[in-house]
Amino acid sequence: MSKKIHPEDYTPVYKPRPMSWLKLQYYRYQVTYGPYLFTPQEAFCYNVFIIVILFLTGWATKSILMKLIPSVWRSSRWILMELTKKGTDSVAVEL
């Protein structure tokens, strides 16, 4: 009869350290987007450009969400108040 193997019995052969995981992600970035082909100065400019684009995208997203969340909250609060006032399961909302 064969012995059943449980997941708890399994010990991985290789457990990556956090630094090696970070190096792997950096390698994937280099190979996928191509900065390994650049000179160090070109790679620096390219990376600064990428960081600026990511920062501006995050900032714009935060700015839009900060303006959008209060209006969505007011609308949802109004709908919930109408539902509890009428005691129905649905409410018609005119836009």
Image (cartoon, helix red, strand yellow):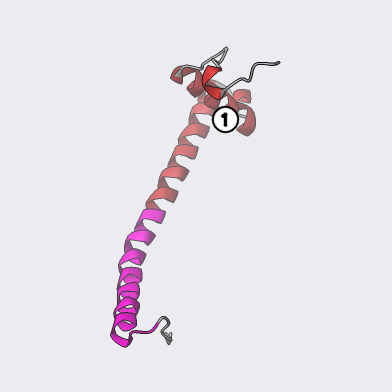
The N terminus appears in which quarter of the rendering?
top right
Rendered view: 11 above or below 85: above
As for residue 73 lying within the magenta part, the answer is: yes
Q: Is residue 35 left or right of residue 67?
A: right
The C terminus appears in which quarter of the rendering?
bottom left
Residue 68 in the image, given as x and y percentages of width and height? 36, 66
Residue 93 in the image, given as x and y percentages of width and height? 42, 85
Q: Quadrant of residue 85?
A: bottom left
Q: Quadrant of residue 70?
A: bottom left
Residue 33 in the image, given as x and y percentages of width and height? 61, 33
Q: Nearer the viewer, residue 22 or 45?
A: 22
Please tell me which residue is depicted at 49% across the width and 32% down the height of the picture: 47
Q: Quadrant of residue 34?
A: top right
Q: Is residue 21 left or right of residue 2?
A: left
Tag 1: residue type? Tyr
As for residue 7 lying within the magenta part, the answer is: no
Q: Is residue 2 left or right of residue 78?
A: right
Q: Nearer the viewer, residue 62 or 38?
A: 62
Q: Nearer the viewer, residue 26 or 47?
A: 26
* Mark 1: few/some/many CA within 10 Å (<14, 14-19, 20+): few
Q: Nearer the viewer, residue 7 or 28?
A: 7
Q: Which residues are magenta?
A: 60-88
Q: How many marks?
A: 1
Task: Provide the secondary structure element on which disc 1 rests.
Answer: helix
Rendered view: 59 above or below 49: below
Rendered view: 86 above or below 19: below
